[in-house]
Image: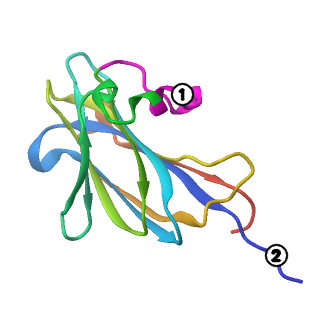
């Protein structure tokens, strides 16, 4: 008797200071499997004046994939607006990218086109009800500047399913 292991990452998120340039926040992830994985990348400014921008690149080539400054100006804004509330964006200045990505390694950079300050970056898998995607997140990572105090870096992830 075999048991199919379906435990998988469905989210990585990091709250961290956005300081600009080499001190921007970077989330890395690897997609493995067949087909495409539907994900939403979200960037939030958590302090006044922080206007987040997301830039997605392939890793390690640095090949540009997509970017967004204000989610409502994006190509799939209507689809983002129709997502469940826990995956939606709030402010017009939040950044969001809804994408169908193939297997590979990616980095998403969270920067600010406004003031420096505290931000949040999230990578979320969008799953159809009752279906396990054939492609999955198999690795997640974050690089962010360490300041301490109110600017501590806080990383989180969510897994779903059974198995190990």
On residue 3, the disc is 2
Callout 1: 10 Å neighbours few (<14), some, many (20+)? Answer: few
Residue drawn at x 21%, y 37% as measured from the top left: 18
**CA–CA distance between discs 2 and 1?**
35 Å
Q: Could you say which quadrant of the image residue 142 lies in? A: bottom left
Q: Could you say which quadrant of the image residue 159 lies in? A: bottom right
Residue 88: in magenta span: yes
Image coordinates of residue 50 in percent, x first then y, are 22, 24
Residue drawn at x 59%, y 30% as measured from the top left: 84
- Looking at the image, which residue sits at the far bottom? 1
Label 1, on which residue? 82
Q: Secondary structure at mark 1?
A: loop
Is residue 155 in view from this perspective? no
Decide: is 47 above or below 163.
above
Is residue 7 in view from this perspective? yes
Comparing 23 with 61, the one in front is: 61
- Residue bounds of the magenta highlight: 79-92
């Amino acid at each position: 008797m075999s048991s199919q292991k379906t435990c998988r990452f469905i989210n990585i998120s990091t709250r961290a200071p956005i300081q600009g340039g080499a001190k921007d926040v970077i989330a890395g992830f690897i997609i493995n499997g067949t087909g495409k994985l539907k994900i939403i990348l979200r960037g939030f400014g958590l302090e006044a004046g922080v206007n987040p921008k997301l830039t997605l690149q392939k890793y390690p080539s640095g090949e540009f994939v997509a970017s967004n400054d204000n989610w409502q100006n994006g190509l799939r804004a209507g689809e983002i607006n129709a997502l469940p509330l826990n995956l939606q964006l709030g402010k017009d200045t939040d950044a969001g990218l809804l994408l169908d990505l193939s297997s590979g390694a990616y980095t998403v950079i969270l920067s600010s086109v406004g003031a420096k300050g505290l931000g949040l970056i999230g990578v979320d898998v969008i799953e159809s009800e009752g279906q396990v995607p054939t492609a999955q997140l198999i690795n997640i990572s974050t690089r962010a500047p360490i300041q301490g105090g109110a600017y501590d870096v806080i990383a989180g992830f969510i897994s779903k399913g059974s198995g190990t």
